[in-house]
């Protein structure tokens, strides 16, 4: 049995029915070596204060619902351990740059709309129907998109991106990484439909390469790379449009 | 259903939140120095177009102690900016290209190769320019 110690967890609280603005509330939480920040929050909810609201599901860094700021760092709370902060206190806040719905729960409506805008699914070319045959891809072709397919929509990258915080019209890291994931897939023929999103001021050009999205991503998706490769694609597209006949972009 | 009231926290002093944000601002700040120096060189060209007198005045500006100091600052800004530029360069290389690289050739290798190439080219230009001055 590992030994129990106590840590202070300071949570940002906000209940829209009663609170004008968010405020901090501290809890003393007993914890053991293997307890995550999420389990600390669950302890608070079960034993100290049932009104604390936060999201979680899988507890194993797969569902992407437990993202929050711990000491200003966007993290998955199920993958972050209390022992790494003890004896200092920790401050847990909802993901930065998003509207706060309630305590640690943020409103992802904006992201979901953006996700939809990038057509995040395979768009085969017309007449390209393999029937019930499998589609073949070489290992290289799989490598082209596999990394970008690991995204769990946790939104840590948006919380790390000051450009999104300053102007939320920016399509943002995860949506652009997913856009690239489908563009980079050899089975896909939907590039033209996605080009508009890429080329927009709020598309890849909204990125100034702060680079923090790739630093905080728990799945090593590297959105910064996806976005910057598409800056080149967007530039090429811009010049090619003058060369190619109309309507055949 | 009524939309619940939400609270959005602002971006006040966002650069204080992470050291990497300050590094980013420093990087972008140096590009302003580079732009200003570009304008200064442009002024030299304009002076040349105006006539020998104007150009000599502009050239005279170069040799004051203050100019030496500013040039050192500008050199530092240029070097820092170029260094960060080469650091992010690998992000822009598509995998189709990187696939042709030998095995074990990582972002870091590409970064190093680019830095060396930059160093050598800069040296060649510097030597050529020094010879031209004599
Ligand atoms: S790109 Fe990474 S950080 Fe961003 S939502 Fe996807 S998994 Fe999370
Ligand atoms: S609870 Fe699913 S990612 Fe943390």
Image (cartoon, coloured by chain):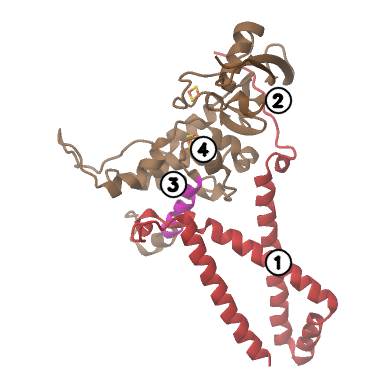
Q: Is residue A174 depicted above or below B44 in this figure?
A: above
Q: Helix or strand or loop: what does disc 3 sit on?
A: helix
Per the image, is A236 magenta? yes
Tell which subunit mark 2 falls on: A
Colour of chain A in the rendered structure image: brown
From the viewer's perspective, tell me whether residue B58 is left or right of residue A60. Answer: right
Q: Residues within 10 Å of mark 3 (few under 14, many from 20)?
A: some
Which numbered disc, 4 or 3, marks the residue that appears first in the sequence? Answer: 3
Cα distance, mark 1 to mark 2?
41 Å
Q: Which residue is mark 4?
A: A217
Which of the two marks, 1 or 2, is nearer to us in this view?
Answer: 2
From the Cβ of disc 3, is ligand 1 less than 8 Å away? no
The residue located at (66%, 56%) in the rendering is B27
Q: Is residue A185 visible?
A: no
Colour of chain B in the rendered structure image: red
Q: Which residue is mark 2?
A: A87
* Same chain assignment for discs 3 and 2: yes
Which of the two marks, 3 or 2, is nearer to us in this view?
Answer: 2
Which of the two marks, 4 or 3, is nearer to us in this view?
Answer: 4
- Badges 2 and 4: C-beta atoms under 8 Å apart? no
Q: Helix or strand or loop: what does disc 1 sit on?
A: helix
Rendered image quadrant of residue A158: top right
Q: Residues within 10 Å of mark 2 (few under 14, many from 20)?
A: few
Q: Residues within 10 Å of mark 1 (few under 14, many from 20)?
A: few
Cα distance, mark 4 to mark 3?
26 Å
* Same chain assignment for discs 1 and 2: no
Q: Which residue is mark 3?
A: A196
**In the image, which residues are magenta?**
A224-237
From the Cβ of disc 4, is ligand 1 less than 8 Å away? yes
The residue located at (65%, 62%) in the rendering is B80
């Amino acid at each position: 049995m590992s030994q129990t110690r106590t840590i202070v967890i300071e949570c940002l609280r906000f209940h829209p029915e009663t609170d004008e603005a968010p405020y901090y509330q501290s809890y003393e939480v007993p914890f053991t070596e293997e307890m995550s920040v999420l389990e600390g929050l669950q302890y608070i909810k079960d034993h100290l204060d049932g009104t604390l609201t936060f999201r979680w599901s899988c507890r194993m860094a797969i569902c992407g619902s437990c993202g929050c700021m711990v000491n200003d760092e966007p993290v998955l709370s199920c993958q972050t351990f209390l022992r790494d902060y003890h004896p200092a206190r920790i401050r847990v806040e909802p993901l930065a740059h998003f509207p706060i719905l309630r305590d640690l729960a943020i409103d992802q409506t904006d992201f979901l709309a953006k996700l939809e805008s990038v057509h995040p699914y395979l768009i085969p070319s017309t007449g390209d129907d393999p029937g019930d045959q499998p589609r073949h891809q070489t290992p290289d072709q799989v490598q082209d998109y596999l990394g970008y397919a690991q995204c769990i929509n946790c939104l840590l990258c948006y919380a790390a991106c000051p450009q999104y915080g300053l102007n939320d019209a920016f399509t943002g890291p995860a949506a652009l990484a997913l856009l690239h994931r489908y563009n980079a897939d050899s089975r896909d023929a939907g590039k033209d439909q996605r080009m508009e999103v890429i080329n927009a001021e709020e598309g890849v050009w909204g990125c100034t390469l702060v680079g923090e999205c790739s630093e905080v991503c728990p799945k090593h998706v590297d959105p910064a790379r996806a976005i910057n490769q598409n800056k080149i694609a967007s530039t090429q597209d811009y010049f090619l449009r003058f060369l190619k006949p109309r309507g055949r972009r | 259903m009524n939309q619940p009231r939400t609270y959005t926290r602002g971006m006040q002093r966002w650069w204080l939140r992470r050291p990497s944000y300050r590094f980013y601002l420093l990087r972008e700040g140096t590009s302003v120095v580079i732009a200003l120096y570009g304008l200064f060189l442009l002024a030299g060209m304009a002076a040349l177009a105006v006539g020998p007198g104007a150009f000599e005045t502009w050239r005279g500006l170069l040799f004051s102690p203050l100019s030496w100091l500013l040039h050192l600052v500008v050199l530092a800004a240029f070097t820092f900016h170029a260094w960060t530029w080469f650091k992010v360069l690998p992000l822009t290389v598509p995998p189709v290209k990187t696939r042709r690289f030998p095995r074990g050739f990582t972002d870091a290798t590409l970064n190093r190769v680019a830095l060396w190439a930059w160093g050598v080219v800069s040296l060649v230009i510097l030597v050529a320019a020094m010879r031209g001055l004599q």
